[in-house]
Image: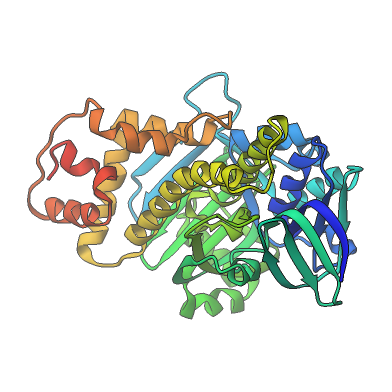
């Protein structure tokens, strides 16, 4: 028996679901969010160790929603530069603000503060209802509406159902939407640390052999540290004493930040990426990680989810303005095609980076060095990577997407490679799709 009808029903009150609801808050729609966790968890989300590197677009979207203004004064830390290292070499690929009118490349904000901020702005919206401790048993749609059945037996209908229930989405599976999963067989150990030297608001990414150590600058002499290792070795880092762990990180960073001190817990996250093969079905849409769940190495995951929900909300707003059905295939396909174009490049590009920097053959190690030097010395490529972080408008093309389109026309020098370096470059080339491959175009191969 159907109990109620809504214009839009959102499954999942994580950052993607909440931000989508807030984007709909200004529209004449009746919106329901179903969440399985308790209201207490939404009001005060537990600290989970994850710090989110936000692009300028994400910051602008959060400001428009009012969520950014809900962050505590010391909640956001500017990232003014970034350095990427390979192995024990002191050579680094460097990024900075380049433009004097930019305060930062991006901003680091704890995940639990983002969730708290979005909940606060959504809970004040009169047209949005949040029901906690609600577990969805089944979801289905027909030509007229979508149906959600709860474990209580209650049936709720809506003109459009949006699933934001994590990268392992049960709703995606129940609606018959397939997805490609990539299990990296690696685990991230995430924690906060204090250090005796200043990080100068610079992020560090150290690709050691068999392990990656990332350091993201927080306020003061504190950083978020992310260690990525083969899953079989993860227990070594969680079982170390605090003293052993501190010295281990100091050694991996070669003393760049001085003495390191663990603050709080070490959190463990297995790394699995996922990309849905389609983002929509009949009166149904995937948003956030349910659509695309990224490896964290390029920090695009949350930013991509925030962009996606804004894209869908914009398509819905246009439909309302033009008097069209908000759950129609025509409206949903606008979202899917727009978001798919951007997400595919970022998803596969990120997986290429992960594969290159985790492969342990001699040729792959040489290839990493070649790649860093190419990126550091080809100014247009480096600039476009930076622009992908600092873009501020939803309609503005991603810097990475633009780079893919523009690579064939870049005025780059031609340097034929020989010997072991050529062998290394060939390894890189095989991992890059033809249209993304600068190595042949500029004469290295």
Q: Is residue 278 above or below residue 407?
A: below
Which image quadrant is residue 245 in? bottom right
Q: In the image shown, does 259 or 320 lie closer to the viewer?
A: 320
Report x, y in % for residue 380. Answer: 33, 28
Residue 127: percent from left, percent from top: 88, 44
Q: Quadrant of the C terminus?
A: top left
Residue extending farthest top: 101
Number of labelled discs?
0
Q: Nearer the viewer, residue 12 or 437?
A: 12
Residue drawn at the location 60% of the way across and 60% of the way down = 290
**Residue pictured at 72% horizontal, 46% vertical:** 20
Q: Is residue 57 left or right of residue 40?
A: left
Residue 44 visible in the current orientation:
no
Residue 366 location (% of width, % of height): 22, 55
Is residue 25 depicted above or below 257 in this figure?
Answer: above
Residue 262 in which image quadrant = bottom right
Identify which residue is drawn at 81% across, 35% down. Answer: 26
Q: Is residue 386 left or right of residue 27?
A: left
Residue at the image position 51 percent from the left and 41 percent from the top: 338
In this rendering, the answer to whether 347 lies above or below 92 is: below
* Place of residue 93 in the rendered image (x, y in percent of width and height, measured from the top left): 37, 41
Instruction: From the viewer's perspective, tell me whether residue 293 is left or right of residue 109.
Output: left
Q: Quadrant of residue 55?
A: top right
Asked whether residue 268 is in view, the answer is: yes
């Amino acid at each position: 028996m159907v109990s109620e009808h809504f214009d839009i029903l959102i499954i999942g009150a994580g950052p993607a679901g909440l931000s989508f609801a807030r984007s709909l808050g200004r529209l004449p729609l009746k919106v329901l969010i179903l969440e399985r966790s308790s209201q207490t968890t939404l009001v005060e989300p537990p600290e989970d160790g994850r710090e989110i590197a936000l692009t300028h677009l994400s910051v602008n979207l959060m400001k428009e929603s009012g969520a950014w203004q809900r962050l505590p004064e010391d909640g956001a830390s500017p990232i003014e530069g970034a350095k990427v290292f390979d192995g024990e070499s002191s050579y680094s690929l460097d990024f900075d603000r380049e433009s004097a009118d930019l305060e930062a490349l991006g901003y680091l904000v704890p995940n639990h503060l983002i969730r708290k901020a979005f909940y606060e702005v959504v809970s004040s919206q009169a047209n949005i209802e949040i029901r906690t401790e609600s577990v969805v048993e089944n979801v289905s749609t027909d030509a007229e509406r979508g149906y959600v059945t709860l474990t209580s037996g209650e049936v709720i209908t809506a003109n459009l159902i949006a699933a934001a229930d994590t990268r392992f989405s049960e709703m995606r599976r129940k609606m018959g939407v397939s997805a490609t999963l990539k299990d990296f067989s690696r685990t991230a150990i995430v924690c906060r640390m204090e250090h005796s030297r200043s990080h100068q608001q610079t992020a560090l990414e150290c690709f050691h052999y068999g392990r990656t150590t990332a350091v993201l600058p927080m306020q003061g002499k504190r950083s978020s540290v992310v260690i990525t290792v083969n899953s079989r070795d993860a227990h070594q880092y969680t079982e170390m004493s605090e003293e052993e762990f501190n010295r281990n990180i100091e050694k991996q960073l070669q003393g760049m930040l001085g003495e390191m001190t663990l603050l709080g817990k070490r959190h463990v996250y297995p790394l699995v990426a996922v990309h849905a093969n389609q983002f929509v079905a009949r009166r149904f849409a995937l948003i956030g990680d349910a659509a695309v769940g990224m490896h964290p190495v390029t920090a695009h995951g949350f930013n991509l989810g925030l962009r996606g929900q804004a894209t869908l909300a914009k398509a819905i707003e246009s439909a309302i303005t033009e008097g069209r059905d908000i759950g129609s295939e025509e409206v949903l396909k606008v979202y899917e095609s727009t978001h798919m174009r951007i997400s595919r490049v970022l998803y596969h590009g990120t997986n290429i980076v992960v594969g290159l920097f985790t492969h342990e053959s001699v040729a792959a190690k040489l290839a990493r060095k070649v790649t860093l030097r190419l990126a550091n010395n080809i100014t247009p490529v480096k600039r476009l990577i930076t622009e992908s972080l600092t873009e501020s408008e939803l309609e503005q093309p991603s810097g990475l997407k633009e780079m893919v389109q523009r690579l064939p026309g870049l005025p780059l020098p031609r340097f034929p490679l020989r010997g072991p370096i050529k062998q290394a470059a060939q390894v890189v080339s095989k991992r890059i799709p033809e249209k993304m491959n600068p190595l042949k175009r500029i004469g290295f191969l």
